[in-house]
Image (cartoon, rainbow, N blue to C red):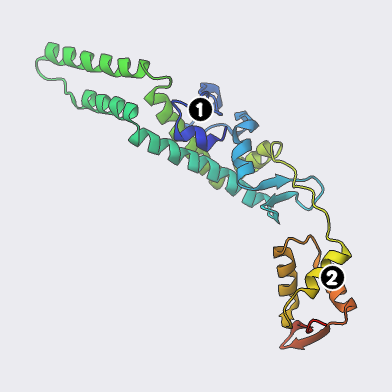
Amino acid sequence: MRLTEWASDPLSSGPPPIPFTTDIVNSSNSAYRVGAIPPEALAEDLTARGLTYANGRGNGYRRNGDSIDAYRVGDVIADVFTDAAECLGYFLATSEPMLSVKAAMDELHRTPLRDDWEVAYSRRSQLSERVSSLERSLPVSYATLDLARDSLARTARSIRGIRYVREEAVRRFREVLPSPPRTRPASRSEIVAFLMALPPGPILRPALHAEAVDAGLVVGARTLYAAADALGWRLTRRKGLAYYCVPEAP
């Protein structure tokens, strides 16, 4: 399950991807210790955002097929934590069970200790028991979810703002990134068929390659240009830009 999906409805989504345990939280603040987070907790979120990794291919990271650097991977990881925190915050602010607990907690905090302390103590005890009763009726308490929301948000800020945390996050979650899909390079006949189907007229060489990619061909720019040259397409230059002249269909 995605972390963001769990955070959207934590009362009915089952166990959280990141456990509710104190040993996973920093001692100095409520941010999660990145090195203690199970990598699988973000696997589905990162895959859904198009991240892949292949060892030995440049820096190895791609998003939706485009190469990206490790710094940008850290941004994507931080985005997952930010989005999960926002989802959880929205749930806490709109879910009826959470609103009931929050209202009881607010009433408890607003109840002062008056001169008649016995009456005040009795009232606060009643309210405290009401809060506890509401919390016990839930599979996960309001306080636990509110702490998780704060931890998610602080973790995102740590990844964005602290270099070693960002680097640790990239290393930590790299192991759960899928490999990019294997694709078959376009055959010569497929490349020629694509070129012959183009409308006549001038076209920039980079635009020609962009159209080939948009058409679903897996072909490098040099291979495509070589095929156009082999067909005898005239190449001209205007103001430093290279154009092919697509001929009329025979």
Q: Which quadrant of the figure has residue 204? A: bottom right
Q: Is residue 25 left or right of residue 59?
A: left
In the rendered image, residue 12, in percent from the top left (x then y), is placed at 46, 26
Name the residue at the left extreme.
Answer: 116
Question: Which of the numbered marks, if any, corresponds to residue 81?
Answer: none
The residue that label 1 is drawn on is: 27
Q: Is residue 138 left or right of residue 49?
A: left
Residue 41: percent from the left, percent from the top? Answer: 60, 32
Q: Position of residue 11 (x, y in %)?
A: 43, 26
* Residue mark closest to the camera, 1 vs 2: 2
Q: Residue at x 80, y 75 (%)?
A: 196
Amino acid type indicated by mark 1:
Ser
71 relative to 125 in the view: left or right: right
Instruction: Specify the amino acid type for callout 2.
Output: Val
Per the image, the residue denoted by label 2 is: 192
Count of numbered tags: 2
| Image quarter hosting the C terminus | bottom right
